[in-house]
Image (cartoon, rainbow, N blue to C red):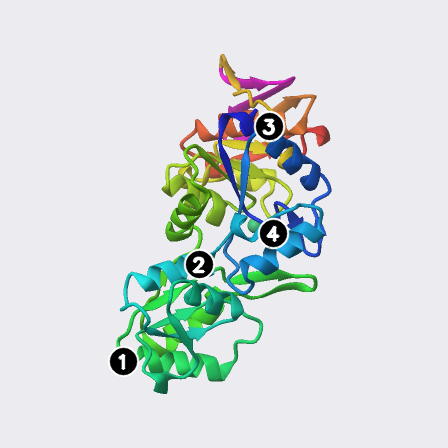
Amino acid sequence: MLCEAYDVALLDLDGVVYVGPDAVPSAPAALEQAAARGMSLAFVTNNAARTPDTVAAHLSELGVPARPDQVVTSAQAAATLVSGMVAPGARVLVVGGEGLEVALRERGLVPVRSADDEPAAVVQGFSPDVGWRDLAEGALALAAGVPWIASNTDLTIPTPRGRAPGNGALVGVLRAATGREPVVAGKPELPLHAEALRRSGARLPLVVGDRLDTDIEGAVRASTPSLLVLTGVTTPRDLVAAPPGLRPSFVSADLTGLLQAHSAPERVGGSWRLGGWKATVDRDVLLVEGSGDPVDALRAACAAAWAEEAFTALRVEAPAGAGF
Ligand SMILES: [Mg+2]
């Protein structure tokens, strides 16, 4: 079982533990059982708006009991980065919300809101309250040449009504206005991962996420094993077409995958087989045949596709039960 093979799960939140306002149905019980079998849980989020206290309270409300010290945010990773660039006790301009302010104070830095305060750095993270005045102060402070740290560069954030501009879009405003480029703390960059390792004390961590271009890419860059869950934004077709830098070590339908042993597909002749499924690449077609657990079909399909040079051009042909 993954929860026995790895000591800490570094869990993404949205699309993994919850989707929008609701917990993923199987998540609370799966995490409880993984913890009971000795796996420590750390909740690692690119969202810099909320404090660890707020995130922990929200998780607990959803039936996933969490302490603030189990939550690691991109705001904390950004504050750690800033503290390595400025003098102790320095003023730092915040373009963002409470999560960033609390994280900066935790590092002994002084959050300010005006370029007239002569900040030694600018730190930018998502908050729904960021407006033109905040962005203008950021641009004015950056004109002095001080370091610029962004919590993350996710272009959009999910909302119940659809996709809205995320921190990456707001970073784009300052990039356009200043011609400068920020240092980024969050996934897929490595500072947030390093912050999570430091705070959790993990020796054999497993990254768990739903996005290939943040969670999984960050894990690959850090040479850390990873589990992709299919409760978020990634579809089976996305996974089959993933280039080498975005491929997880394991895939499961949801967090119950932590409680499973994962068998690797077996190569038999020109096909890959697993649990009643057979996947074969024939010219530009990835043919999936058989029956059984659809995640096994996906595992066999990935093995077959990823063994090919032209994996991105493959057309998938699979029966309805394969889940594609
Ligand atoms: Mg996610």
Residue 31 occupies quadrant: top right
> Which label sits in the foreground, 2 or 4?
2
What is the distance, in whole Å, between disc 1 and disc 2 at their CAs? Answer: 24 Å
Stretch of the chain drawn in magenta: 270-285
Look at 63% across and 46% down and name the residue there. 17
- Residue under pointer 1: 144
What is the distance, in whole Å, between disc 3 and disc 2 at their CAs? Answer: 29 Å
Mark 2 Cα within 10 Å, few/some/many (few <14, many 20+)?
many
> Which label sits in the foreground, 1 or 3?
3
Mark number for residue 37? 3
Report how many numbered discs are placed on residues in the image.
4
Residue 183 left/right relative to 230: left
What is the distance, in whole Å, between disc 1 and disc 3 at their CAs? Answer: 53 Å
What is the distance, in whole Å, between disc 2 and disc 4 at their CAs? Answer: 18 Å
- Confirm if mark 4 falls within 8 A of ligand 1: yes
Q: Image height check: is 220 above or below 105?
A: above
Looking at the image, tell me whether mark 4 or mark 3 is earlier in sequence order. Answer: 4
Looking at the image, tell me whether mark 1 or mark 2 is earlier in sequence order. Answer: 2
- Residue under pointer 2: 76
The amino acid pointed to by label 3 is Arg
The amino acid pointed to by label 1 is Ala
Mark 3 Cα within 10 Å, few/some/many (few <14, many 20+)?
few
Disc 2 secondary structure class: helix
- Residue under pointer 4: 14
User: Which secondary structure type mostly characterizes the magenta part of the structure?
Assistant: strand
